[in-house]
Image (cartoon, grey):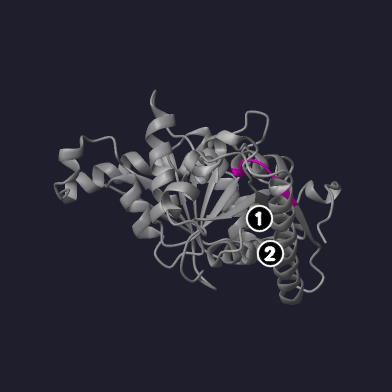
Amino acid sequence: MTSPESTMDKGAVVAGYDGSEEARRAVRWAAGEAAARGCGLVIAHVVGFPPVPEALPGGGAWPRPGFLEAGQETAQRHAEAMLGDIAQDCRRAWPGLPVSTRLLSGRAPDELARAAENAELLVIGSSGLTALPRLLVGSTANELLHDYHRPIVVVRAGDVPAEGKVVVGVDGSETSREAIGFAYDFADRHDRALVALHVWSDLPLEAMAVTPTEHDRELIEERGKPLLDESLAGYRERYPDVPVQRVIAVDRPAHALAEQAEGAALLVVGSHGRGPLRRALLGSVSRAMVHHAPCPVAVVRHHKERHAGYPKTRG
């Protein structure tokens, strides 16, 4: 039975579900995170159906009266059964976890964003049931990554490591500080080590293809260390139990992040970065990580009204 919208949605972890194995993995990841946060889990499924004749394939004649209504009803019954199954699976695996479901109708990006408007976190899979998952579901993910105003986690294909470090990209921006706070909070609640990675990418691309000398490395370390120190300031006191490794690399950001994320429990990146083209440049890095990172990826947006740190909570 699909539950109505309730106050449980506020402060919950919301997971999008389409019945695919990828989405099931994302829901289970979301359930574990909700349990760790001590909050509820909301599993949302979006049913799309052609509302106008132009939406019908092949340009055929408008179907007989009642056809669309019958199809919609069938789709809803199937979706409710599917949601019930995954909800029961989560309740069995995490006894005591409050789990509710939401059956929505419309465009997936719009409806998922609306369902997670007051959520702590939105979790989706990296691909789904369609024949062109990278294109179709990827477009949904791209819309959500661009427009959704709260943290979003994309769970990729393959096994999610039971253990592993948390990796966060650090570039000195306000968005980066939001990502650092999210990463520290996750690492603290899950008893993981944190790797803070700063990629020195202010060189032209052709220069980055040349192996830096020892002198170059020393100079880069000297310039990068203050940025890391400033970006991480205050978090050691707030999260004293989180071991932190600071890494400075000379590389393309996406490549360096992907390398560090091997075997990680989570990679955290900001949605925007430095410079006048930060929306395009770091946005491309975020999208690259969503498609290619070897672990779940959290993309965090900057909110002017939100403090850069996250409240320290344990579920």
Q: Quadrant of residue 188?
A: bottom right
Which residue does the numbered mark 2 point to in the structure image? Answer: 31
Q: Where is residue 21? Give x, y as percent.
A: 55, 67
Frontmost residue, 314 versus 284: 284
Which residue is at 84% across, 50% downward?
Answer: 4
Instruction: Please state the extent of the stretch shown in magenta in the rendering.
Output: 103-108
Q: Kindly tell me whether residue 130 is visible in this rendering.
A: yes
Q: In this rendering, is residue 85 above or below 37?
A: below
Q: In this rendering, is residue 21 above or below 173?
A: below
Q: Where is residue 6? Give x, y as percent.
A: 85, 48
Q: Where is residue 74? Give x, y as percent.
A: 71, 58
Magenta-colored stretch includes residue 105 = yes
Kindly indicate whether the residue at mark 2 contacts the one at mark 1 (C-beta within 8 angstroms).
Answer: yes
Frontmost residue, 286 versus 132: 132
Q: In this rendering, is residue 292 above or below 283?
A: below
Q: Quadrant of residue 192?
A: bottom right
Would residue 210 be found to the left or right of residue 159 on screen?
left
Q: Quadrant of residue 51?
A: top right
Where the N terminus falls, by quadrant? bottom right
Q: Secondary structure at mark 2?
A: helix
Which residue does the numbered mark 1 point to in the structure image? Answer: 15
Which residue is at 15% across, 39% downward?
Answer: 206
Q: Label 2 amino acid?
A: Ala
Q: Label 1 amino acid?
A: Ala
What is the spatial separation of the Cα atoms under label 1 and label 2, in whole angstroms?
A: 8 Å
